[in-house]
Amino acid sequence: MRGPLACLASCALVSAAGWTSFRGDNGFGVDASVGLPAEIGPAKNVAWKTPLPAGTSSPVLTKNRVFLTAHEDKRLLTIAIDRGSGKIVWRREIEQPRSERLHKLNSPASSTPATDGSNVYVFFGDLGLVSYGPDGNERWRVPLGPFSNLHGMAASPVLSGGTLLFVCDQDSESYLLAIDKNSGRQLWKTKRDAVVHGFATPTLFTPKGGQTQVVVPGSYVLASYSVATGEELWRVRGLSWQIKATGIEHEGVLYMTGWAPGADAGQSKPLPAFEQALAETDANKDGKLAPEEINPSPYKHGGSWQAIDLDADGFIGSRDWSFYRARRSARNVTIAVRPENARGDITDTHVAWSNDRNVPQVSSPLLHGGILYVIKDGGIFTSMDAKDGRVLKTARIPGAIDNYYSSPVAADGKIYLGSETGKFSVIQPGGEWEPLSVTDFDEHIYATPAIAGGRLYLRTAKALYCFGRAAK
């Protein structure tokens, strides 16, 4: 098992490059910074604080800037902040052309930007993709949508060399999109017909001697595509029906989690084929199921009708039923996949291990020192051996029993984690992890912290905080 120092050495490039996308370099969530505080709070170890408009996107970093998005008075905002002082350098506004349906916890500014160290690339569900230069000049704009996602969009764009990648998983016409980062020109667009709405940000994977792939967790399937062409290369079946968490890659192994309501261990309720369901419940014999036909039956959907009426026509047809049937048999799970030289369906050959206990609802996993960490609602923090998925410790974080939408990050031998209502925990990592401190911000935390250069940047509901060394 690799120790913390080995992990820090392997992650040195993260700190050198900055924290340039959601959870840093390739979403890994670990930085080589040292000297970070063991206690963080609204009045503890604050280097600076900058008030912000509303938004739930996470900050990303270049050498001198912090980029994030926000919304205010029907305007979509992209904001650049000086890393040293917290001063807003520029703010760009776009009038919100529409207002898409959102879950109450979602936001018009929920997707995290990506940066190449100079330019910034942002996505808004009510607009599409936009790129700004270092001085805030708009470089290009790619309108997208409207989208058929009952909770609104939330995945973030990622960069692979000169290609900007964005996944749009929705209830009809899901796709993966590749854009030239300099011109905004579409390079390719690959349909993802086998998936419905989801919120996970892709992960990059480059096999030894091979070309870079983009790995996308979606409903029921984990799939990999060529960054160069968009061709699907391999897939793993068995993910849950609604995917929110972003995966991580380390030394050729991909770690993914997927949680959705009704798919915990023991909750599976298999359904028959559509033809049998029609024979038993289609009272008026019109070849589709209305709410009053399905709800009194053994196949009652529960939850939101909109989640299974994918085309929103008021009825359950064959396609709707096929996804509903898969949903009722789905399983929440954390998996490890070794896809070296993989092609086609690799479910039975390349899955190293799976674990269906304590799967996080939204937060992405964290790998640190050979141990995989996940946080589940209720403040249930679990450490697992990354080699085999064996649980090392599961316990609630004292003083932080809450819901979790922010993902854990790590640096300087510490794990940092914020809860929905603002409980911020610093944890000593290890198989038998221990909390070092818990502080209450008394405001919501949905964004994931960013770390670089011995500082931690945390967005709360009202402000961006910088913790650590004061500016020189």
Image (cartoon, rainbow, N blue to C red):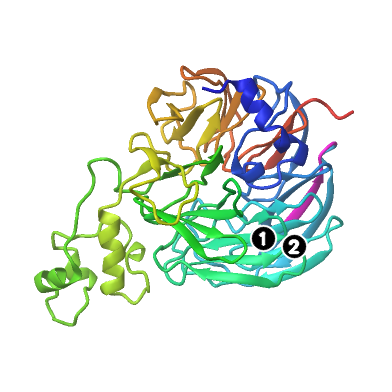
- Mark 1 and mark 2: Cα distance apart in space: 10 Å
Q: Quadrant of residue 306?
A: bottom left
Q: Quadrant of residue 322?
A: bottom left
Give the percent coordinates (x, y) of residue 173: 46, 72
What secondary structure characterizes most of the magenta part?
A: strand
Disc number placed over residue 131 in the picture, else none: 2
The answer to whether residue 413 is seen in the rendering is no
1 and 2 marks in contact (CB < 8 Å) = yes
Residue 346 is inside the magenta segment: no
* Label 1: which secondary element: strand
**Residue positioned 69% across, 63% down in the render:** 75
Find the residue positioned furthest to the left: 280
Segment tinted magenta in the rendering: 78-84
Q: Relative to the observer, which residue lies in front, 442 or 219?
A: 219
Give the percent coordinates (x, y) of residue 424: 58, 29
Residue 195 as seen in the image, left or right of residue 231? left
Indicate the amino acid at tag 1: Leu
Q: Relative to the observer, which residue lies in front, 349 or 194?
A: 349
Of badges 1 and 2, the one in the foreground is: 1
Disc number placed over residue 263 in the picture, else none: none
Would you call the spot at circle 2 few (<14 residues within 10 Å), some (14-19), or many (20 or more)? many
Indicate the amino acid at tag 2: Ser
Of mark 1 and mark 2, the one earlier in the sequence is 2
Disc number placed over residue 164 in the picture, else none: 1
